[in-house]
Amino acid sequence: MVIPAAVREAIASHARDELPNEACGLVLLEGDRAVEYVPAENASPSPYYFELRLDPERWADMGDRDVEQAVVHSHVSSPPRPSRTDVERIGLWRNRPYLIYSVRLDELAAWRIAEDGAVGISLERDPHESRSAG
Amino acid sequence: MITVRIPPTLRTEVDGARQVEVSGESVREVIDDLVDRHPALGPQILADGQIAPFVNVYLGGEDVRTLNGLDTPVEAGATVILLPAMAGGAPTPPDGGLPIAARHPARTGPVVSGLLDLVGGTPLVELTRLAPKPGVKLYAKLEGQNPTGSIKDRVALAMIDAAEASGELEPGRALLEPTSGNTGISLALVASQRGYPLTCVLPENATDERKRLLRLYGAELVLSPAAEGSNGAVRLALEMAEADPRWFMPFQYANPANPRAHYEGTGAEIAAALDRVDVVVAGLGTGGTLMGVGERLRESNPDVVVAAAEPLPGDPVMGLRSLEDGYVPPILDVSRLDRKLLVSNEESVAAVRALLAAEGILAGVSSGAVVHVARKLAGELDEGVVVAILADGGWKYLSADFWETPDEDVGRSMEQTVWW
């Protein structure tokens, strides 16, 4: 998965703005390339929990576009690895792209999560940019 | 017919369809019809006869769980939206919370060579609970954070600096000032640090805390008749200064260093901190704050509304100055005030109590008047930024009984004391 620097910074900036609570949103992907970050509201603001809330019509419209969606949320201080809560609450998002950004470590990681565990997705440098996405 | 929009996460169960047409008169009937047509959806969206925990069902933009659940009626032609219910979160530490340092990162305070270097630079705190509507941001500038606990530290320092710079004030002269409290305390601090004796003229019904504080800071007191209020203290001090030239009277009511302190300090700080200010509210005392802050903020936004909180005429207890009571300070140009709102003691006390209860800010009585006016003007806006300048903290008013007095008795309880 390729995360351009602008998308990565949008994720990081939103996560910093929401401190001390977790931030959440969606990344829209064209193929394996992230093209946009859509910040969402954390409907249960907490340093240890997120509940993604977006206008339902807007989210449904995004689902009708030819883009794939990845759920994104921040961990305030822990590493960007799926927690037990993330796995237990994966629900309909099982085996779909899932990004976690650690604010403290300034690290972004991508996963596919199922009830029995998570598999990492490698994040690659944007070939048009000099800076690493990860 | 009812249209059900299907998210990408459930489209394999409906042969890739983005939406499905079904029939039904309630959410339950709609989902039952949907599951009849696409049985693979059943275990994904229903659990124990209810909407499954990982699915949200929306009708008219509302989560049907917040309406009437599966029994929510659905009108013909409506659109029902299915979406994933996404939640998760970081591992919770055993103690259930972040280290305090992570929640409240340490901020480096200034290191200064003396207390007077800490005058000004006061914080702006957003009053999220007292803001009357979501589109209007209401900020309080906490002047109680100055070294002696009031906005007058700025004025006292500016007046002494200006007098020393002009040569009017030299070692060996004595300071005299009419003040019912805050300015005297501020002048006493500055005078003690610069080596001048200070005599304050104040109404005899000023609070005991004020009198004690003035004495503790090293000031001598001359008491003026209670019935004449702040104006009586001004009259007596002017008479004393005229009779004896050894006095140097900074006289905040006529000293241009007073509004300049607010132009260069208070107003400049607000302009630098906020991208936008639509309304600024301060109490009408000497007029220094309103003149200086107003002039500075107009440079950034010529349309800013400069509003004064003024006590009702004949109401000496507020401490704020009613222009109807006969003395207009020379530094005050009433034409530079865009709004002037009258506030009763009862309204001021109600607001100062609300400020403490809702925002945790213990402020002085005049701040109640200012917050009352700020909320009123904020309510007139659809969106914008309102700044209320809170002149001092509530610590100097603890002996007053209005904090706990029943609302109907507030007026009577405040009749005997000058609060400014």
Image (cartoon, helix red, strand yellow):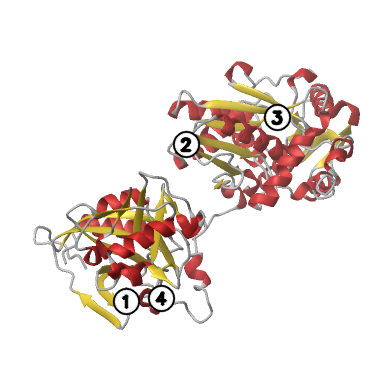
| In the displayed structure image, the side of residue B242 where residue B69 appears, left or right | left
Q: Quadrant of the C terminus of chain B?
A: top right
x, y (%) of residue B283? 67, 32
> What kind of residue is marked 3?
Gly
- Tell whether label 2 touches label 4 (CB within 8 Å): no
Residue closer to the observer: A116 or B341: A116
Residue at image mark 1: A81
- Are the residues under marks 3 and 1 on the same chain? no
Question: Left of B399 or right of it: where is B393?
Answer: left
Snapshot quadrant of residue A53: bottom left
Secondary element type, mark 2: helix
Residue A105, can we see it?
A: no
Please rate how many residues cluster around mark 2, counting C-alpha atoms within 10 Å: few if below 14, some from 14 to 19, many from 20: some
Chain for numbered disc 3: B
Q: Residue at x 14, y 65 (%)?
A: A125
Q: Which residue is mark 2?
A: B271
Q: In the rendered image of this protein, does residue B119 appear above or below residue A51? A: above
Q: Which mark is residue B200?
A: none
As drawn, the label of residue A85 is 4
Q: Chain of mark 4?
A: A
> From mark 1 to mark 4, how far is it between C-alphas?
11 Å
The amino acid sitting under disc 1 is Arg
